[in-house]
Amino acid sequence: MKKPKEVKVSDLGEFGFIAWFSPAFLRKLPRGVVGIGDDCAVIPWRGRKKLVVTTDMLVEGVHFLKEKISAEDLGYKSLAVNLSDIAAMGAQPLYSFLSVAIPPETEISWLDKFFRGWRKLSRDTRVLLLGGDTTGSREKIVISVAVLGMADEKNIRYRSAARPGDIIAVTGTLGDSEGGLRLILSAETSAELSKSEKFLLRRHCRPRPHLEEGQFLATRPEVRAMMDVSDGIDSDLRRIMERSGCGAEVYLEKLPVSPALKNCAQKYRWPLEEIAAAGGEDYCLLVTVDPKKFIQLAANFRGRFGRELAAIGRITPEKGRLTYLKEGKPYALRKSGFDHFKK
Ligand code: ADP
Ligand code: MG
């Protein structure tokens, strides 16, 4: 008799996998504790203060290629991607833990540069390193980071708070990091890099966590749902839709793109709008906002940061339905956001 085919994690996908195992761990949580499902877990702390906690991992060959990213950038990025999840809750980061698995041949000079990059960002953000773990690895470097932060209960923003009619907005340009990744992976990139190419590479290798933007937005009651853009808005918006029980429409021509990405898209014939919608690792913030208060909020945001809070779409009542519109007409994206188990 033929053996029944084993279900693989790739059949579930990254998010199907999390949805499959997490319900058992969400039952009977103590009062005030928020578990799996948002950018950070939330734990009651002192009075109205809450502790927020996140952890993220970077694996050689999956998240980075050792020959293609400098050790300094990698140290910076390992902390940055975790701080981005703290920013997504509207919280202030405080403490970090760093665990590394490293092959014995790893050069101390490489590790020295790694810590130089880490320290640069930890100094800028006043995040202290309090511990971690070190182990050997056969071949690949694995970096696992945890960060703890603090926020006022009333300022914490969740993925689950979006409502139909809300305006969807982002705090930065989209697709730059994917552009940088394409340059890293492409053989045709010229030896002499243009200004635009350097910009995209830097955006990929040294993402800036939007901590101040997150804390600013979190003080405004009209900001409802918030998360960071790690897998691309096509994937990340679906997380907000799932948690909030709603749908969304996105206007492709409104996706904010940098002049550098436009230049390179033209030069290399990249699909600009697809990259903006589905490219990952931009680490800006994605928010939904009460439509009556959006214009004022965007004006205040511009005044404070000198950049746009770019409106890119609307939350709709149709559960689970994400529609893209290009000049008012429905448009099917070819590529969707990043999933670790999907090819
Ligand atoms: P983010 O990109 O913001 O870090 P993810 O999409 O990676 O969030 O994860 C979604 C949620 O699932 C988060 O709350 C995360 O903590 C949780 N999660 C992911 N993997 C695991 C795991 N192996 N065990 C427990 N929780 C997990
Ligand atoms: Mg996140």
Image (cartoon, grey):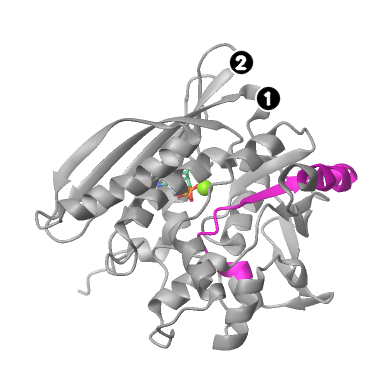
The Cα–Cα distance between marks 1 and 2, rounded to whole angstroms, is: 8 Å
Check if residue 283 falls in the magenta segment: yes
Check if residue 300 falls in the magenta segment: yes
Which residue is rendered at x = 41% and y = 54% of the image?
17
SS at mark 1 in the image: helix
Front residue of this view, candidates 163 and 69: 69
User: Residue tagged by mark 2?
Assistant: 48
Q: Where's residue 103, x and y in %? A: 13, 55
The dot on residue 326 is none
Residue 269 visible to the viewer: no
Which residue is rendered at x = 77% and y = 67% of the image?
254
Category of crowding for the residue at label 1, using alpha-carbon neighbours closer than 10 angstroms: few (below 14), some (14–19), many (at least 20): few
- Type of amino acid under label 1: Lys
Q: In which quarter of the image is residue 141?
A: bottom left
Image-based side of 39 in relation to 308, left or right: left
Residue 171 visible to the viewer: yes
Q: Where's residue 286, x and y in %? A: 65, 51
Q: Locate the N terminus by quadrant.
A: bottom left
Disc 1: residue Cβ within 8 A of ligand 2's nearest atom:
no
SS at mark 2 in the image: loop
Extent of the magenta region: 276-301
Instruction: Say above or below: 321 vs 34.
Output: below
The dot on residue 154 is 1
Category of crowding for the residue at label 2, using alpha-carbon neighbours closer than 10 angstroms: few (below 14), some (14–19), many (at least 20): few
Front residue of this view, candidates 102 and 223: 102
- Type of amino acid under label 2: Arg
Q: Do the residues labelled 1 and 2 touch (CB within 8 Å)?
A: yes
Which residue is rendered at x = 47% and y = 78% of the image?
193
Q: Where's residue 160, x and y in %? A: 65, 41
